[in-house]
Amino acid sequence: MEQRISLITLGVRDLARSRAFYEALGWRGQEVQETVFFQAGGQGLVLWGREKLAADCGVEPAEAPGGPGFGGIALAHNVRSAAEVDDLLDTARRAGARITKPGTLSELGFYTGVFLDPDGHAWEVAHNPGFPLSADGALTIPDLTPDEG
């Protein structure tokens, strides 16, 4: 298996509401057969009915991502400055998100905040100078092995 993620699918309760939320963030999607597809850099974000996603995954809806309680997934969106973190959190709040962690400097030295979309999917927004972004927004994971020094 190649080490990459191609699509992230979020099971949503109300497809129209979720599409409107992401479009209010500035994203543009395409709807095909009650499924919305967003190009997200080199990946795709898909919005699909929660019940349909659960059935497709072979689980009961309560076990599906985003079911009761935390669904066990967090998506991350890295930006180029701390100011961009605060700006994006504000945009998300205006679009209907709930801010669960306002922008703050982490113990590891990067600036981060978190919002929940209308279905409770967690999005971390972070500025981490140690994880550089290319011109097209692709993230580069640096060599994280400790120096043998």
Image (cartoon, rainbow, N blue to C red):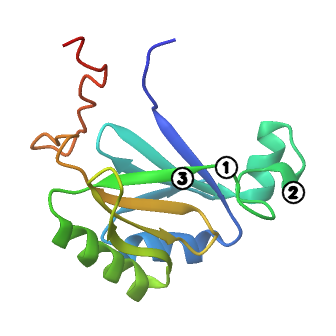
The span from disc 2 to disc 3 (Cα, nearest Å) is: 18 Å
Left or right: 44 with respect to 13? left
Label number found at residue 72? 1
The span from disc 3 to disc 1 (Cα, nearest Å) is: 7 Å
Q: Quadrant of the C terminus?
A: top left
Point 78% across, 60% down: residue? 67
Q: Is residue 104 above or below residue 135?
A: below
Mark earlier in primary sequence (2, 3)? 2
Q: Which residue is mark 3?
A: 74
The location of residue 31, given as percent across then percent down, is: 51, 58
Q: Kindly give the residue lying farthest to the right in the view shown.
A: 60
Label number found at residue 120? none
The location of residue 138, given as percent across then percent down, is: 23, 39
Residue 94, picture quadrant: bottom left
Point 49% across, 85% down: residue? 96
Mark earlier in primary sequence (1, 2)? 2
Q: Which residue is mark 2?
A: 62
For label 2, the SS is helix
Task: Determine crowd level at label 2: few under 14, some 14-19, many 20+ residues with C-alpha closer than 10 A.
Answer: some
The location of residue 145, given as percent across then percent down, is: 31, 19
For label 1, the SS is loop
Task: Determine crowd level at label 3: few under 14, some 14-19, many 20+ residues with C-alpha closer than 10 A.
Answer: few
For label 3, the SS is strand
Task: Determine crowd level at label 1: few under 14, some 14-19, many 20+ residues with C-alpha closer than 10 A.
Answer: few
Three-letter amino acid code of the residue under disc 2: Ala
Q: Kindly give the residue lying farthest to the left in the view shown.
A: 135
Left or right: 101 with respect to 138? right
Residue 17, picture quadrant: bottom right
Three-letter amino acid code of the residue under disc 1: Gly
Nearer the observer, 132 or 105: 105
